[in-house]
Image: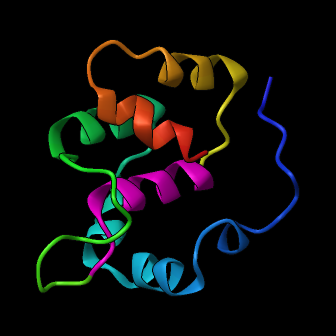
Amino acid sequence: MEIQTSGRPIESLLEKVLCMNILSSDYFKELYRLKTYHEVIDEIYNQVDHVEPWMTGNCRGPSTAFCLLYKFFTMKLTVKQMHGLLKHPDSPYIRAVCRGL
C-alpha cells in the first residue's frame, strides 16, 4: 500500500530557496543513480552526519540529509517502507531524515 500524500507539491513542503538549491546541486543530481529504497538508506548511513537543511561553514549549499529527504519525496514509498525507516536500528540519521517525510 502506497503512502497517501496531501496532494501538495514537494516544493510547498520545504522552503523555496532550499528546494531550488537542492534541485540544482551536483550531489542531488548524483542521487538519480539510486533507484531503490535500500540504496537511499545506505546512502544516508554512509554520508549523513547532521540533519540541518544547509551545509555548515561558508558553503551554503543544501545538506546531504535534505537532498536525500527530497529523494525520498520523489519515490513512492509504501507504508511498510515508512515503518521500516521509522524503526531502523542502524543510524539515528535514517530515522531523522524520514521524520521529515
How far across and down, in percent of the image, does residue 64 sit? 28, 59
Q: Is residue 94 left or right of residue 55?
A: right
Q: Position of residue 91 (x, y in %)?
A: 27, 24
Picture residue at 31% right of the left edge, 71% below the top: 54
Give yes or no for residue 11 being in the magenta stretch.
Answer: no
Residue 47 lies, with reference to residue 94, above or below; the image says below
Residue 36 is situated, as x and y percent measured from the top left of the image, at 45, 36
Which residue is rendered at x = 80% and y = 22% of the image? Answer: 1
Residue ranking furthest to the left: 57
Q: Is residue 71 left or right of residue 51?
A: right
> Where does residue 61 sit, x and y in percent of width and height?
27, 80
* Image quadrant in which you'd find residue 76: top right
In this orientation, which residue lies closer to the viewer: 81 or 29?
Answer: 81
Q: Residue at x 42, y 37 (%)?
A: 96
Q: Main SS of the magenta segment?
A: helix
Query: With 4 as the anchor, is 19 left or right in this view?
Result: left
Q: How many marks?
A: 0
- 96 lies above or below 28: above
Q: Which residues are magenta?
A: 61-74
Front-most of residues 58 and 42: 58
Which quadrant holds the C terminus?
A: top right
Q: What color scheme is it?
A: rainbow
- Compared to residue 9, the image places residue 42 above or below, namely above
Residue pictured at 41% horizontal, 59% vertical:
66
